[in-house]
Image (cartoon, coloured by chain):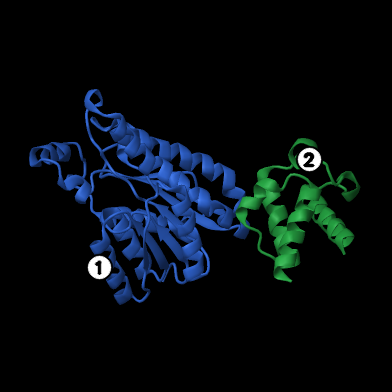
Amino acid sequence: MMQDIENDIRNLVAEIIEKDPSEIKSDARFVEDLGVDSMMALEILAGVEKKYKIAIPEEKLADFKTLDSIVVIAREYLSKNA
Amino acid sequence: MMFKDKVAIVTGGTRGIGREIVLMLAREGAKVVFTYAKSVKEAEGLITQTEKLGVKALGLQIDVREFEKTKELIEKTKAAFGGLDILVNNAGITRDKALMMMTREEWHEVIDTNLNGYFNVTRNAIVTFLKQKSGNIVNISSVSGLIGLARQTNYAASKAGIIGFTKSLAREVALYGIRVNAVAPGFIETDMLSGLKEEFKAKMLEHIPLGRLGKAEDVSAAVKFLLSDAASYITGQVVVVDGGLAIK
């Protein structure tokens, strides 16, 4: 299940930042390594919210640093909903 | 009704230009949340008036200088009315004085309310607008920010700052369906002007080509236009409502 979430989010991010999913390592830094800007980060947040039907507070945007960090946040809010 | 079911926030909504904007929005069917710092009685009166127009407004006593309170403003608006579509930043004060006599407090108070206040509210609203890919922001500036009126270095600086803020933000969020514009009123008959001496007002009139002071309705009409679909190709602009005072 966790692996599914990681792959799903990897694909979501890949679509938004227009890169191949294989280019997105779990610990790659969005801003420094993948050229993600704040607007893209917000699109990723909105995409994750829509996909998993969760609400992630705006403040968490600052923590959207790597794929790993997003998976952790998504997991946190999924479990709150469960 | 131009803004039927749209949710709007107007800061500094109980008096003067802000009050007229609240009433304009209510007449056009919007659900309005307005803020005020001290004018409790005026707020109650305004809520009653909006009720008569069909949509009871929500008045929140919030000091726009407080970042966390402006965050609550956005949250309470969304809780009460289900979303946010329009933001009119209007809350502003003057502490007029010749610079040589101006205290640091008088400088900071004006910058804090007029400029930082706009940052606070807009910063707390912008992610909502970005996520939904729509939004409309109008910032009330002033001719003082354009041409500089004497004894208003603090006010003019804050109002000029709002113009820069408006243009920068407009460029930044345009592709997300968000328009950001400013209105720069001239001399408008409100409490802000009532403290001035009659001789001074008479002198001001000499510099106004249209020969009269403005009314709050003149300003709210410009705001209404900028918020409407008729202005859908207008962003990052400053609409000057001054009877020709600041013609370049």
Q: Which residue is nearer to you in this view: A34 or A2? A: A2
The residue that disc 1 covers is B45
Say which mark, if any, is on residue A29: 2
| Colour assignment, chain A | green
| Circle 2 SS class | loop
| Circle 1 SS class | helix
Q: Residue at x 58, y 47 (%)?
A: B173
Say few, some or many: other residues with alpha carbon within 10 Å of mark 2 (under 14 / 14 to 19 / 20 or more).
Answer: some
Say few, some or many: other residues with alpha carbon within 10 Å of mark 1 (under 14 / 14 to 19 / 20 or more).
Answer: few
Q: Which residue is nearer to you in this view: B147 or B190? A: B190
Q: Residue at x 74, y 71 (%)?
A: A82
| Residue furthest to the right | A22
Q: Can the viewer see residue B224?
A: yes
Say which mark, if any, is on residue A16: none
Instruction: Name the amino acid type tagged 2.
Output: Arg
* Residue A73 drawn above or below residue B6: above
The N terminus of chain B lies in quadrant: bottom left
Q: Which residue is nearer to you in this view: B130 or B170? A: B130
Q: Position of residue B241 (x, y in %)?
A: 31, 47
Instruction: Name the amino acid type tagged 1.
Output: Gly
Q: Residue B11's quadrant in the figure?
A: bottom left
Q: Residue at x 87, y 64 (%)?
A: A1
